[in-house]
Image (cartoon, helix red, strand yellow):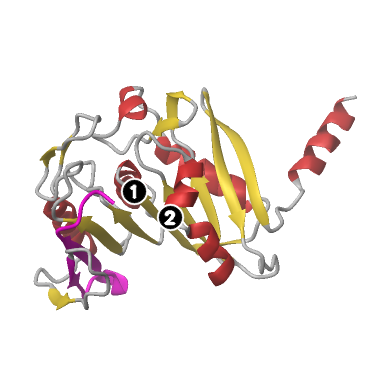
């Protein structure tokens, strides 16, 4: 009977993921955690494929992030795999990640979302062929804060990050290797203020400033302290303008880029 049970387990574990959407569940300590995977139509299991991890905002969930980010549609166009991690919370659809100083249930209960991400990467690699050198993290708000924490504490697995509307949630960063960063933030963000401090959202977080985040990573990556500034063309008549600051010449070719949306809010 034991042999039959082991054989059944191995058979189930060996089933590869095909194109489309899949919900995955794994245990991380006492926590039951889930994530949503989108495998693109043109996925070729013979080729190592890039993976993007989009972390939803506080009080949201993976389904929200699919609609908000458009990354599943982009996945089908560009050929990468997307895995949307689900945070934790008392309510099934109102979830948060522990990014350090934010947010909510995950922070209060000291949920180890770094270990969750590590286990997620191990789990998905069993059933799709991931390129381990091209695993990227992004996120919105609380999810952006989480992506910064991963860059610092899981830099052996994360190639680069693209946080949106969320600063670093820790006083320092200590990556084991340079991690390129591209950060998008509106100067009129009232929920996670550009200059730091408490925002108007429900988290009650005293946020670090965007400059704190950028300078920490400029130092960690060994980038130039003087950025190259470019004012980007205005393509949408919504009252905003965009300045890109690039801190280049970092170790191993790394850079830190700030895309500053003047007049932009929390989006």
Q: Could you say where residue 2 lies in the image, as x and y percent from the top left?
A: 86, 26
Residue drawn at x 66%, y 65% is 41
Pointer 2 residue:
69
Instruction: Determine whether 225 is above or below 205 in the image.
Output: below
Few, some or many residues within 10 Å of mark 1 (<14, 14–19, 20+): many
Nearer to the camera, 176 or 184: 184
Is residue 257 shown to the viewer in this render? Answer: yes
The quarter in which the N terminus is drawn is top right
- Looking at the image, how many numbered discs can be counted on the residues? 2
**Residue 200's image quarter?**
top left
Q: Could you say where residue 251 lies in the image, as x and y percent from the top left?
A: 26, 70
The dot on residue 217 is none
Instruction: Determine whether 21 is above or below 74 in the image.
Output: above
Q: Would you say residue 19 sits in the magenta stretch?
A: no
Q: Is residue 259 left or right of residue 28?
A: left
Nearer to the camera, 48 or 187: 187
Q: Give the magenta range.
A: 241-267
Residue drawn at x 62%, y 62% is 40
Q: Could you say where residue 97 lies in the image, as x and y percent from the top left?
A: 37, 36
> Disc 2 versus disc 1: distance between alpha carbons?
9 Å
The dot on residue 140 is 1
Mark 1 secondary-structure assignment: strand
Numbered disc in front, either 2 or 1: 2
Residue drawn at x 23%, y 69% is 237
* Callout 2 touching callout 1 (CB < 8 Å): yes
Which of disc 1 and disc 2 is earlier in sequence? 2
């Amino acid at each position: 009977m034991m042999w039959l049970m082991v054989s059944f387990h191995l058979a189930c574990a060996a089933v590869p993921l095909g194109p489309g959407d899949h919900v995955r569940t794994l245990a991380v300590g006492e926590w039951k955690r889930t994530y949503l995977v989108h495998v693109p139509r043109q996925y070729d299991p013979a080729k190592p494929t890039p993976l993007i991890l989009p972390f939803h905002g506080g009080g949201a969930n993976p389904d929200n992030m699919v609609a908000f980010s458009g990354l599943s549609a982009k996945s089908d166009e560009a050929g990468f795999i997307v895995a949307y991690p689900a945070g934790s919370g008392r309510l099934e659809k109102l979830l948060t990640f522990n990014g350090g100083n934010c947010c909510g249930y995950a922070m209060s209960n000291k949920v180890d979302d770094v270990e969750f991400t590590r286990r997620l990467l191990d789990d998905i690699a069993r059933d799709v062929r991931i390129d381990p050198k091209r695993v990227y993290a992004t996120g919105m708000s609380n999810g952006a804060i989480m992506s910064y924490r991963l860059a610092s504490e899981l830099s052996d697995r994360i190639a680069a990050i693209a946080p949106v509307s969320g600063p670093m949630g820790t006083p320092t960063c200590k990556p084991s290797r340079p991690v390129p960063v591209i950060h998008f933030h509106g100067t009129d963000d009232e929920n996670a203020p550009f200059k730091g401090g408490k925002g108007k959202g429900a988290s009650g977080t005293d946020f670090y400033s965007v400059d704190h985040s950028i300078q920490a990573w400029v130092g960690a990556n060994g980038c130039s302290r003087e950025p190259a500034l470019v004012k980007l063309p205005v393509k949408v008549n919504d009252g905003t303008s965009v300045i890109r600051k690039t801190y280049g010449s970092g170790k191993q070719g790394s850079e830190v880029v700030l895309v500053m949306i003047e007049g932009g809010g929390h989006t």
